[in-house]
Image: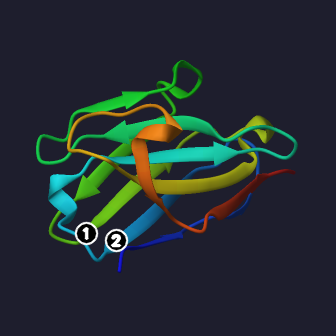
Amino acid sequence: QVQLVESGGGLVQPGGTLRLSCTASGFTFSMYAMGWFRQAPGKEREFVACISGRSGITTYVDSVKGRFTISRDNAKNTVYLQIDSLSPEDTAVYYCARASSATLRTTMEDYIDWGQGTQVTVSS
């Protein structure tokens, strides 16, 4: 069965950096776009970034452009999210998800499998 397992979250001071990882199994990883979403306390889950299947084209929500970098290693079945210059507003549970196809997707409805999430807390 499909499994998506996130790791790399934690407590970080403002201005710090984190790299989240999501290791996938149960499907041909390179054939699907992968995305990251986040859900802050009391807010709806929101799209953060997506990377396409084989070509590795990326897209981001405007609010994270320049600070977040999504990447993938198809040989390791893993997608990453590098987060730089963390601020308290980045505090959230971060989820990785498998899109329904290899092309870029930005809405939750276009994702068919989800990880359990990893908590990122930014605080001094």
In this rendering, is residue 62 above or below 81? above
Q: How many marks?
A: 2
On the image, the x and y values in percent for residue 76 come to 22, 72
On the image, the x and y values in percent for residue 23 come to 37, 71
- Which residue sits at x=21%, y=63%? 29
- Which residue sits at x=67%, y=41%? 45
The residue lying furthest to the bottom in this view is 1
On the image, the x and y values in percent for residue 47 come to 54, 35
**What amino acid does circle 1 point to?**
Asn
Nearer to me, 92 or 1? 1
Question: Mark 1 packing: few (<14 Cα in 10 Å), some, or many (20+)?
Answer: some
How is this picture coloured? rainbow
Label 1 and label 2: CA atoms lie apart by 5 Å
The picture quadrant where one finds residue 121 is bottom right
| Residue assigned mark 1 | 77
Question: Mark 2 packing: few (<14 Cα in 10 Å), some, or many (20+)?
Answer: many
In this rendering, is residue 60 above or below 56? above
Determine whether, in the image, residue 120 is placed left or right of residue 27.
right
- Which residue sits at x=35%, y=80%? 1
Determine whether, in the image, residue 64 is placed left or right of residue 24.
right
| Residue assigned mark 2 | 24
**What amino acid does circle 2 point to?**
Ala
| Circles 1, 2 touching at the beta carbon (< 8 Å) | yes
Determine whether, in the image, residue 72 is placed left or right of residue 23.
left
On the image, the x and y values in percent for residue 116 come to 60, 68
N-terminal label among 1 and 2: 2
Find numbered disc 2 in the image and state the secondary structure of the residue it sits on.
strand
* Circle number at residue 106: none
